[in-house]
Image (spheres, rainbow, N blue to C red):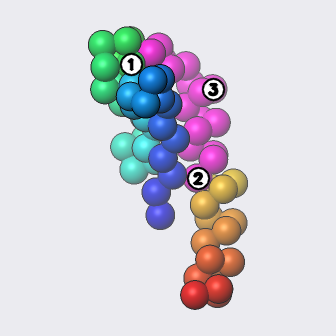
Amino acid sequence: IEFIDSYYYNKLEYTRFSSSVGKFVGFTEQGVRIAAAWNNDPSKLSAMKAQKEAVCLNNVQIDYNNM
């Protein structure tokens, strides 16, 4: 299970957090700067890592039971 949180501006993805990578990745020049700043913030990283447990792991059994 992977948690992905993407950020877009004008239909262009500029930054993404992926739980499999464990950090933010930038896709544009501005996105790389934003990702670097967010990766240097331990509270932001730990909050995003906690989202996998809060959102994905608690709901995966519900989705599989409905299939």
Q: Which mark is residue 31?
A: 1
The residue lying furthest to the front in this view is 10
Q: Residue at x 62, y 64 (%)?
A: 57
Examine the image and state in which quarter residue 42 appears: top right
Kind of residue at badge 1 = Gly
x and y percentages locating residue 36 in the rendered image: 40, 17
Kind of residue at badge 3 = Ser
Mark 2 — residue?
52
Which label lies toward us, 2 or 1? 1
Region in magenta: 34-52
x and y percentages locating residue 2 in the rendered image: 46, 57
* Secondary structure found at label 1: helix
Q: Which mark is residue 43?
A: 3
* Secondary structure found at label 2: helix
Q: Are marks 2 and 3 in contact (CB under 8 Å)?
A: no
Q: Nearer the viewer, residue 62 or 53?
A: 62
Examine the image and state in which quarter residue 11 appears: top left
Q: Residue at x 64, y 87 (%)?
A: 65
Label 3, label 1: how far apart the Cα atoms are: 19 Å
Above or below, 65 against 44 in this view is below
